[in-house]
Amino acid sequence: MKIYKDYDDLPKIKLPLGQEVSISDSTIRDGAQMPGIVMKSQQKFQIYNYLNRIGIEKLETFVYNERDRKAIKLMMDQGYEFPEITGWARANPADIDMVLNIDGIEETGVLMSVSDPHIVDKMGLTRETAEEKYLNALQYAVDHGLRTWAHIEDMTRADNYGFTFPLIKKIMDIDPDCTIRVCDTIGFGIPFEGVDEPFGIPMITKYLKDELNVKNIETHCHDDFGLAVANSIAGYWHGANWSNVTFLGIGERAGNAEMEKLLLFLARRIEGFDKYNLDAIIEFSKFMENEIGIRIPRNKSVVGNNVFAHESGIHSAGVIKNPFTYEPYPPEIVGGKRIFLIGDSSGIEVLRYKVQETLNELMDVNIEVDKNDKRLRAIQAEIQKLYNDEKRVSCISDEEIMAYVKKYFMFNQMVSKEMHRRDHDENGDESESSGLNEIKPRMHDTID
């Protein structure tokens, strides 16, 4: 019999091929092309530092303008081994020269658009002239000592058997170590086996590995159909050893595969995978929100404000007793914090938890409140009346809970103390000061 009562009880899965997998980041390259986003050099530098804390292996960047080059210099001056800073170039020698002019960059990507809309409509070329252009650029980079990866743009809308695969075979003849980046540029990729060209990520990955003997395969997936992370995992599942992502999935249109989701999947679901440090993820997301201007939905997985927030009675009661009940992983894994909220679906258990928490904060002692305490029930009745009268459409804040606690628990005690003093003064039995010494807080006074 199998019993799953704790995070460690759940089995982890294995990548079928057992290969070492890595992550490259495109947050300051592809991510920075997100409409409305402008990254300053210092902000790119701070992103680089977060990537270093996490342990991301590579980072790609543009080198076209002074702002890019200033950011690269700031990164290089840190002296970090990871992430390695790589360049990115269009398929022409002039672009590659700009990469070569940056001290310390030893690898560059070369853009190779392979679908007919890109070749014919965007660039005004034929397949033959496009292939010649791409191969000449790659040869130029190799001849000048650069390691390369080929950015095979729009591969999931291309004639792969008729054009792309033969092109990649020639690429491997020039640079057998070239990383082939499978670009699902418009998000048409499908993560399921049995889907042939041009959409099938498993098919493409297996063909590159088994038929063309590509050593390094990387996915670069966009999220137009919401499958970017699934396609990235499918790439790993079928033999890719790299995935190119952006933090929070920022990028053009619907964005890219989200780094934080991929990191969490690898760290929590894959056996023996512990090379990345995830506890900076929430802090990183706050930086992106506050400094870059990315709006994070509250229910966004991994980094949303609601990921570890509990309101409903059943869920909250379960988490209070055992977080494993309704939390898929502990909040501290990603640098988060568990939050209990009081709303229209909250039960007495979570309200009791919040009241106890507030009393402990106010009085600096460990206090337990019985769930049948009339004061607790009175607070619950007031809150429910707000919702029942449709005067409230949001959760009750911590500040409001504190006000309720002061009203029903602390204020009642002060009244009791004052009446105690008066009784002693009128009877002349004791002085005021000696009477105060006899007063004990009573946490279960009844409400008339």
Image (tube, rainbow, N blue to C red):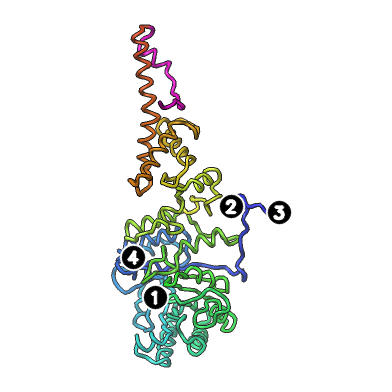
Amino acid under disc 4 = Ala
331 and 44: which is toward the camera: 331
Residue annotated with mark 1:
88
Label 1: few (<14), some or many (≥20) within 10 Å?
many
Tell me, yes or no, whether the highlighted magenta stretch contains residue 41: no
Query: Who comes first in sequence, dot 4 or dot 1?
Result: 4
Residue annotated with mark 4:
71
Label 3: few (<14), some or many (≥20) within 10 Å?
few
Q: Quadrant of the N terminus?
A: bottom right
Residue annotated with mark 3:
1
Give the Cα separation between the discs numbered 1 and 3: 54 Å
Give the Cα separation between the discs numbered 1 and 2: 41 Å
Amino acid under disc 1 = Trp
State if disc 4 and disc 3 touch (CB < 8 Å).
no
Amino acid under disc 3 = Met
Q: Please tell me whether mark 2 sits on a helix, a strand or a loop.
A: helix
Label 2: few (<14), some or many (≥20) within 10 Å?
some
Q: Is residue 373 visible in the rendered structure shown here?
A: yes
Query: Who comes first in sequence, dot 2 or dot 3?
Result: 3
Q: Main secondary structure of the magenta part?
A: loop
User: What residue range appears in magenta?
Assistant: 429-448
Q: Residue at x 44, y 26 (%)?
A: 446
Q: Please tell me whether mark 1 sits on a helix, a strand or a loop.
A: strand
